[in-house]
Amino acid sequence: MFEIPGFSLPISFPDRRESKRRITLALLDQDGDIAKELLAGWSHATDAAYSPASRCARALLRHMLEREIETSRQRAISRDASGRPVLEARAGEILPIISISHAGRFIAAAYGFVARLGLDLESSAKTRDLQGIAELAFGPAERRQVEQHGPDAFYRIWTGREALAKATGRAFAQVMDRRDYISEALSEGVAQLYLDGEAWSLAHARPLEHLFLAVAWQD
Ligand SMILES: CC(C)(COP(=O)(O)OP(=O)(O)OC[C@H]1O[C@@H](n2cnc3c(N)ncnc32)[C@H](O)[C@@H]1OP(=O)(O)O)[C@@H](O)C(=O)NCCC(=O)NCCS
């Protein structure tokens, strides 16, 4: 048996020992030995339809979910019409929300027994036109943060926007809507946001120098 090299976000719920109150997250190098073991033991016939990164993320999720739901190994993880990953349900079950992201060699997967959840992982690239993307996609306060604080602010806002967009299911349309979602400078850790009168939590982490990760959820 192997250990997944996950890492914990500083998310503090009242009782972290209670699995129903946790968000569980793992990050994996899809070219590494653990990924190969996962693919050997936790793949499902329906994964054949997906890319190597998507197959690896699905195997990782099944392994992560083993302690939460019965027969996680035998569950298909499909996509709904919007692209959102959906875990195969048995009658009457309460299932966690799942989310997936890929960036270069890395994949990240998360689940939580929460109302909504979205995860995004992004690898920084020196050649990307950050100001140009911010002009196209971000809101005015977010663009100012990128002007003032450079790439770190850009990647925190980018991953935060994508995590929120995956959590709402509006995906690309929301990511590119030029509205401010993250108006204040963010560092690692959990922030509270209010969007259209709804409270959201948004956690950021930087597991490697070039990797930025955000998780957005609603309890
Ligand atoms: C889904 C989306 C939000 C993120 O895509 P991405 O960052 O390119 O890709 P990621 O690897 O992070 O995420 C892919 C996963 O998102 C999930 N996903 C796709 N559509 C989704 C939706 N509507 N809701 C929730 N999750 C979704 C899927 O699980 C997918 O994994 P899979 O292919 O293994 O099933 C995409 O629609 C998008 O908007 N991309 C825009 C990228 C961009 O140009 N950003 C620049 C401006 S900030």
Image (tube, rainbow, N blue to C red):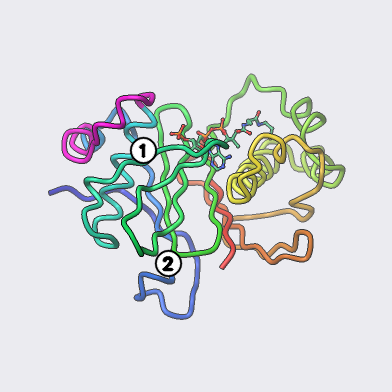
Residue 22 circle label: 2
Q: Nearer the viewer, residue 93 or 131?
A: 93
Q: Is mark 1 within 8 Å of ligand 1?
A: yes
Q: Disc 2, disc 1: CB below 8 Å? A: no
Q: Where is mark 1, residue-wise?
A: 57
Is residue 168 positioned above or below 16 on the image?
A: above
Write down the quadrant of residue 24 in the picture.
bottom left
Query: Magenta stretch: residue 47 in it?
Result: yes
* Numbered mark located on residue 65 in the image: none
53 and 80: which one is in front? 80
Q: Is residue 141 magenta?
A: no
Task: Name the residue type under label 1.
Answer: Ala
Earlier residue among tags 2 and 1: 2
Q: Main secondary structure of the magenta part?
A: helix
Q: How far across and down, in percent of the image, does residue 114 sit?
A: 50, 64
Farthest residue toward the top? Answer: 127
Instruction: Tell me: 45 left or right of 153.
Output: left
Which amino acid type corresponds to the residue marked 2 in the rendered image? Arg
**Dot 1 crowding, Cα within 10 Å, few <14, some 14–19, many 20+:** many
Which of the 4 image quadrants contains residue 149?
top right
Mark 1 falls on what kind of element?
helix
- Report the span colored magenta: 36-52
Name the quarter showing ligand 1: top right
Q: Please identify the residue farthest to the left as the structure is shown.
A: 1
